Image (cartoon, grey):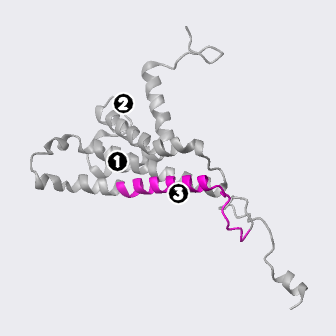
Amino acid sequence: MTDQDTESSRVPEQVDDDPERKDHRRRGDWVTRYTDLCARRGIRLEACYVTVLLFSCPVMLAVLHYAPCRVVMPGTFAFLAGVNDYLYAWIGGLFGGTLFAIKWLYQSVAHGWWHVDRRLWRILSPHLSGGLAFVFLCIVRSGFVTILDSESMTKPVSVVAVAFLVGYFSDSALRKMQDVAESFFGRPDSTPGGGPKA
């Protein structure tokens, strides 16, 4: 085989322009960008954290639904009867927030955007989503405002489904809650400099 044949058999070094893979890497470039050991450990740590959350949520939902502890110790956990739906909401929101954090983590690593300064966001955002879903259910159940029909939120599967959406789209949920707050308390006035008006 001649040198010319060898050259022609090589894969051309062109950037993959597939719109689904906008990570600006050449075909066959499989080596990680993250050569620093601390960065690789940080990525693995965060991946393990969100993976544990991912598999914990269905387990918690199953335990809450079947509640084996009530059979073993009847009456001990009777107080859960009144708060089950709110626990469903919290766990459903946590589940949605965790999936969003996983999606953001693998995209940021693949695109080269990962950095340690966002670690707090990656750790806390799933729990923020759980808290938002909990409060969202409180707002719906209270009848304080009409966002959803409260009667449709009596089944656990409905609670989990809506809570998951609130958790996954927590930014949109926060904007909706801001609209609700502003409809009751008014939009806060501010000075041109951005500070509160005296």
Q: Secondary structure at mark 2?
A: loop
| Circle 1/circle 2 CB separation < 8 Å | no
Region rendered in magenta:
27-56
Tell me what residue is drawn at x 13 percent, y 44 percent. 78
Residue on which the image places disc 2 = 145
Q: Which of the numbered marks, if any, corresponds to residue 91? A: 1
Residue on which the image places disc 3 = 44
Amino acid type at circle 1 is Ile
Residue 198 drawn at (x, y percent) = 55, 7
Q: Which of the numbered marks, if any, corresponds to residue 46? A: none
What distance separates the C-alpha of mark 2 from that of mark 3?
A: 43 Å
Which numbered disc, 1 or 2, marks the residue that appears first in the sequence? Answer: 1
What distance separates the C-alpha of mark 1 from that of mark 2?
A: 23 Å
Tell me what residue is drawn at x 29 percent, y 36 percent. 141
Residue depth check, mark 1 versus mark 2: number of the one nearer the observer: 1
Amino acid type at circle 2 is Val
Name the residue furthest left.
Answer: 74
Q: Secondary structure at mark 3?
A: helix
Residue 109 drawn at (x, y percent) = 61, 55
